Amino acid sequence: VRYKQKGKEVDWKKLQNKIEGRVTPTAAPNFTEIRENMIWNEIKPKRIPNLLVAVKNENDIGEAIRFARENCMRIAVHG
């Protein structure tokens, strides 16, 4: 699944191949369920992200930030 971010095509599988955690794009059938089950201090943001990244380690965090930067994506870190 690819989508465009600021006119540029983004391939989220590149990120998935670099991390141990899980990348879930908005097009995934379980996206809404995963998003609803995330902990947000009981406040769910109104905006919907293009990707959810469930990291497993410090390397995953760095790769997710690098991917977001390279693809002009905004990020939020929770945890």
Image (spheres, helix red, strand yellow):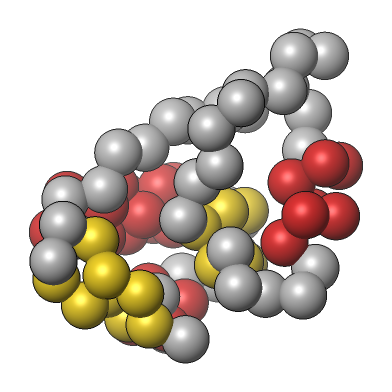
Q: Is residue 37 above or below residue 45?
A: below
From what the image shows, is residue 64 above or below residue 44?
Answer: below
Query: Which of the pair 54/73 is nearer the observer?
Result: 73
Q: Judge left or right: residue 79 versus residue 69.
A: right
Which quadrant does the C terminus fall into?
Answer: top right
The x and y percentages for residue 61 are 41, 47
**Residue plotted at (57% across, 54% down):** 52
Look at the image and tell me whether residue 76 can be seen. Answer: yes
Question: Toward which corner of the image does residue 4 lie, by quadrant?
Answer: bottom left
Give the quarter of the image for residue 8.
bottom left
Horizontal relation, residue 44 to residue 73: left or right: right
Q: Is residue 1 left or right of residue 24?
A: left
> Residue at 30% across / 38% down in the picture?
74
Residue 22 lies, in percent from the top left, at: 62, 67
**Picture quadrant of residue 27:** bottom right
Q: Is residue 3 left or right of residue 34?
A: left
> In x, y percent, where is residue 16?
47, 77
Residue 27 in the image: above or below residue 14: above
Residue at 44 percent of width and 31 percent of height: 76
